[in-house]
Amino acid sequence: MQSLWMLAAAACFSLMAACTKFGAQDFGTFELVFYRSLFGVVTIGGWALVKGLSIRTERFLSHMKRSFLGTLALSIWFFAIGALPLGTAMTLNYTNPLYMALILTILAIRRKEPLELGLVGSVLVGFFGITLVLRPELRAGDEAAALIGASAGFFTALAYFQVKELCVMKEPEWRIVFFFTLFGTVWGLVGQLLDGGLHPLTAQNIPPLLGMGIFATIAQLCMTRAWGAGNMLLTSALQFSAIVFAAFLGLVLFSEPISLQSAVGIGIIIAAGITATLLTKRSTAKPSAAKR
């Protein structure tokens, strides 16, 4: 039952993406990253202050590496949300398990280790699914946006490896998220100031910003609970329901229909992503078991 928290997380991430798409009508990508991150800084920083926790760390450079990669992935995803159909942008963001499997495969080749055929297969099948999703959905001129959006999963995968490294260093999760949102706040603000400055806030454009921050925070809490005490197989499967939720919201809120070919592609990506997630966890667990 704990794994069902992932359904709530997926729904909230999809609602956050929908709010981001609404916000993209009035704000630029850097500006959206700024407000999204600022909400996290205030929320987590306030909680840490009340709890008497310190943000001081001896792993500052590691935090910066993780924060840079994560913020870059977030910026690319927000750009894709504004430029592409919501379901397509969400699908591209959830390709990170495929990139993780690809990275592990490349590392195995470099180390001359036996290849995990399941990982190789999941990568090939998953990227085939991506081509099915993109081909019917892209309008003329969207090709560049799709290619940029497809890289979000890659940088998310790199950020995930950095998070694992910080966890091994015994850094608390809240501090990892705090530095990530702090970096994103500065990144978004500086980027937007260089791009012409912040747009004025109005009664019409504030609600999407608040929704973006609120749904993202709730989603993070639900996801943490799901991974912390849930069944790995079920939790891994349920995280991809965000793609389905986003496709539904895209249809209802933005009149973005999903073709049969795209639906098949989404199904292939979900299946390949679940397989890649489970095989990646098994592959990364082997060295730890060997050390014991």
Image (spheres, rainbow, N blue to C red):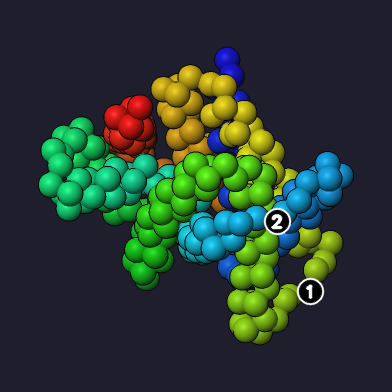
Q: Residue at x 73, y 60 (%)?
A: 38
Measured in 3D between alpha carbons, the distance from the residue under mark 1 to the one under mark 2, in whole angstroms, is 34 Å
Locate the N terminus and report the quarter of the image it occupies.
Answer: top right
Q: Dot 1 surroundings within 10 Å: few (below 14), some, or many (20 or more)? A: few
Give the amino acid type for the residue marked by disc 1 in the picture: Pro
Nearer to me, 151 or 251: 151
Q: Residue at x 84, y 45 (%)?
A: 52
- Judge whether 285 appears above or below 99 on screen: above
Give the amino acid type for the residue marked by disc 2 in the picture: Arg
- Comparing marks 1 and 2, which lies closer to the viewer? 2
Q: Residue at x 44, y 29 (%)?
A: 236
Q: Does 171 sit left or right of 164 as displayed? A: right
- Residue behind mark 2: 56
Quarter of image, res 277: top left
Residue 45 appearing in the image: yes
Disc number at residue 200? Answer: 1
Q: Where residue 143 sits in the image (x, y, percent)?
A: 34, 66
- Judge whether 33 appears above or below 130 on screen: below
Q: Residue at x 66, y 84 (%)?
A: 196
Locate the C terminus and report the quarter of the image it occupies.
Answer: top left
Q: Where residue 30 sits in the image (x, y, percent)?
A: 61, 70
Q: Where residue 2 sits in the image (x, y, percent)?
A: 59, 19
Q: Where residue 56 sits in the image (x, y, percent)?
A: 70, 56
